Amino acid sequence: MAGPNLARRAVAAAKVIVVKVGSSSLTTSAGGLDRARLDGLVDALAARQLAGSHVVLVSSGAIAAGLAPLGLRRRPKDLATQQASASVGQLLLIEQYAGSFSRFGLTVGQVLLTTDDVVRRSHYRNAQRTMSKLLQFGVVPVVNENDTVATQEIRFGDNDKLAALVAHLVGADALVLLSDVDGLYTGDPRLPGSLKVSTVQTATDLEGIDIGAAGSDVGTGGMASKLTAATTATGAGIPVLLASASDAALALSTESAGPVVGTAFESAPRRTNARLFWLRHAATSAGTISLDAGAVAAVIGRRKSLLPAGITGHAGDFEAGDVVDLLDPAGAIVARGFVGHDACELVAMIGRTLADLPVEQRHEVVHADDVVAI
Ligand SMILES: Nc1ncnc2c1ncn2[C@@H]1O[C@H](COP(=O)(O)OP(=O)(O)O)[C@@H](O)[C@H]1O
Ligand SMILES: N[C@@H](CCC(=O)OP(=O)(O)O)C(=O)O
């Protein structure tokens, strides 16, 4: 078959497949968990798992599922109430998934992630190892953001982006985004003139598409976050299918010659280094370090480590191991990296050569392996 169907064939053939489902597809109009819809989704996920693929589920719905038990009528605006709701709702959600998958003899594992957990080198390896172990055991990981502890600054905020990053973390062959809409439309799907887009091959196919219409009351991201997630995943070599949760069985079918559903996004061939991928897309920085022109050329152009001699200043109260933005002489962000020194230590190091420094400080400010150009 020709080009446009490559992504759909990749989804059908994927050995490891990440599936994201949004809050709107799991809740009733009254706001509680919709057990029948959740069971319908699990039917499709379990069928795919039992057909020999490893399924990783990224499920939203914790905040929405906690609303009714807390007597809340609508999704709260403030973070603390959202977190309280997520604390109650995540338990109900995972309990429901565990029961539903057990109908097929399948076990689920709960994985709650924050950006920090996966961006720091040691934590990242740990998250990757845990996921791979769960897959080896034949467990279906059910992933969500760790809403109760994530602060406003470090929140992913929407699970579409989290799903794209998890797809990369587990080395997925495909990502399926399930929503309350059956694909990408040229404009607000509720308007009669909007047409469904079957395949997106390159970014130019997205030109002129209107994604301004608000999404559901219980979800957060809307179509903009789905497109960002799709572009992030495809840019890293992972094809994406955006489809309606009610079409989950067709979207997850291993039969590529079946009915065509959703919008397929073709992927680029490139796969980036996983940890640096997280660094670029998920990390929020704890501070900035300003570079002189020579250091910019060395770090960005020649992929060298950043040494104290090339630094002209810094801002923020960061510690060794934190993520910092690297600025060029004009103040523009040119790279992001893991810093090797605390901010208070850097003060006395600025502009000096390594040989001038006490022995314990004679190492890079940002190692070449720990930096990604923006
Ligand atoms: N061009 C578009 N094509 C499809 N849906 C769109 C578009 N623009 C806005 N939307 C809205 O985005 C919504 C999906 O986002 P959201 O409600 O956040 O879903 P979820 O809860 O599944 O994450 C759709 O219900 C639709 O109303
Ligand atoms: N972690 C939040 C996810 C919020 C979110 O991204 O919602 P959605 O736009 O429905 O995917 C929760 O479980 O409620």
Image (cartoon, grey):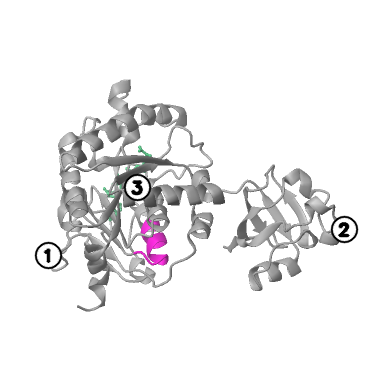
Residue identifier under label 3: 134
Placement of 122 over or under 364, stated as above or below: above
Within 10 Å of disc 2 (Cα), the crowding (few <14, some 14-19, many 20+) is few
Q: Secondary structure at mark 1?
A: loop
The magenta-colored residue range is 228-238
Residue 191 visible to the viewer = no
Q: Earlier in the sequence, mark 1 or mark 2?
A: 1
Asked if residue 347 lies left or right of residue 193, the reply is right
Q: Secondary structure at mark 2?
A: helix
Q: Residue 233 colored magenta?
A: yes
Q: CA distance from mark 1 to mark 2?
A: 68 Å
Asked if residue 261 lies left or right of residue 134, the reply is left
Query: Which kind of residue does numbered mark 2 sit on?
Result: Asp
Q: Residue furthest front?
A: 137
Q: Residue furthest bottom?
A: 2
Q: Residue at x 32, y 63 (%)?
A: 173
Query: Which kind of residue does numbered mark 1 sit on?
Result: Gly
30 or 165: nearer the eye? 165
Placement of 351 over or under 116, stated as above or below: below
Within 10 Å of disc 3 (Cα), the crowding (few <14, some 14-19, many 20+) is some
Asked if residue 192 lies left or right of residue 348, the reply is left
Q: Residue at x 31, y 27 (%)?
A: 67
